[in-house]
Image: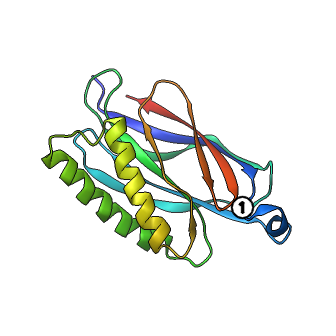
């Protein structure tokens, strides 16, 4: 019987540095990753932002060897087991991302409580996507840092790629889940 699933980050690729071709020549992207994990009951946890790499240019890849554990969440038996995460990628410019994460987490919890009250399961991909979009709108409006629109991911036996597009930049995050 499965009791938990762990989300691992394998690598992050800078497909296109932020800011367009002119700004790219002026500096590098300082990329941070955080998340909101959602377990099988719909309870949410904060995964604090950490520095992925401070000098991304076009084509740079940060590989985690071994893969970096991002979140471990409780699951229920099923195929696939239920749990998910909202991945948050940002370029740190002013600091305060973890304070923003705390507020975004509170907003996500409120939104998921509303969904549960309406009889919806917040771990279902369609509902999770709605919550991620709302969290993203809030972060984009409130954060002083450059936050990419969030990407929701659910447990999948196959490895996945989360693509982040924003601020004239593109990043691809390779991830996988391990269920035990």
Q: Mark 1 Cα within 10 Å, few/some/many (few <14, many 20+)? A: many
The x, y position of residue 97, in whole percent, is 50, 70
Whether residue 36 can be seen here: no
- Determine the image quadrant of residue 178: top left
Q: Residue at x 41, y 32 (%)?
A: 155
Q: Is residue 174 left or right of residue 87?
A: right
Question: Does residue 103 appear to the left or right of 140 in the view shown?
Answer: left
Q: How many marks?
A: 1
Residue nearest the viewer, comparing 74 with 126: 126
Q: Which residue is mark 1?
A: 18
In this view, 80 is above or below 32: above
Q: Callout 1: helix, strand or loop?
A: loop
Q: Is residue 171 left or right of residue 34?
A: right
In percent of width and height, residue 24 lies at 81, 65
Depth check: give the residue in front, 73 or 166: 166
Q: Residue at point 54% right, 76% down?
A: 144
**Is residue 11 in view?**
yes
For residue 169, above or below residue 39: below
- In the picture as drawn, the residue positioned furthest to the bottom comes out as 94
The x, y position of residue 10, in whole percent, is 61, 40
Tell me the quarter of the image containing the N terminus.
top left
């Amino acid at each position: 019987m499965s009791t938990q699933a762990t989300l691992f980050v394998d690598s992050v690729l800078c497909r296109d540095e932020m800011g367009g071709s002119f700004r790219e020549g002026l500096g590098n992207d300082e990329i941070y990753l955080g998340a909101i994990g959602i377990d099988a009951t719909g309870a949410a946890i904060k995964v604090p932002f950490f520095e992925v790499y401070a000098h991304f240019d076009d084509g740079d890849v940060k590989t985690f060897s071994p893969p970096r554990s991002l979140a471990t969440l409780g699951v229920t038996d099923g195929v696939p087991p239920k749990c998910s995460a909202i991945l948050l990628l940002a370029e740190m410019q002013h600091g305060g991302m973890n304070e923003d994460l705390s507020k975004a987490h509170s907003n996500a919890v409120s939104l998921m409580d509303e969904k549960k009250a309406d009889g919806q399961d917040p771990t279902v991909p369609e509902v999770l996507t709605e919550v991620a979009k709302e969290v993203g709108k809030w972060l984009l409006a409130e954060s002083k840092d450059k936050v990419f629109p969030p990407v929701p991911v659910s447990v999948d036996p196959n490895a996945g790629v989360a693509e982040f597009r924003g601020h004239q930049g593109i990043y691809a995050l390779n991830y996988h889940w391990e269920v035990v």
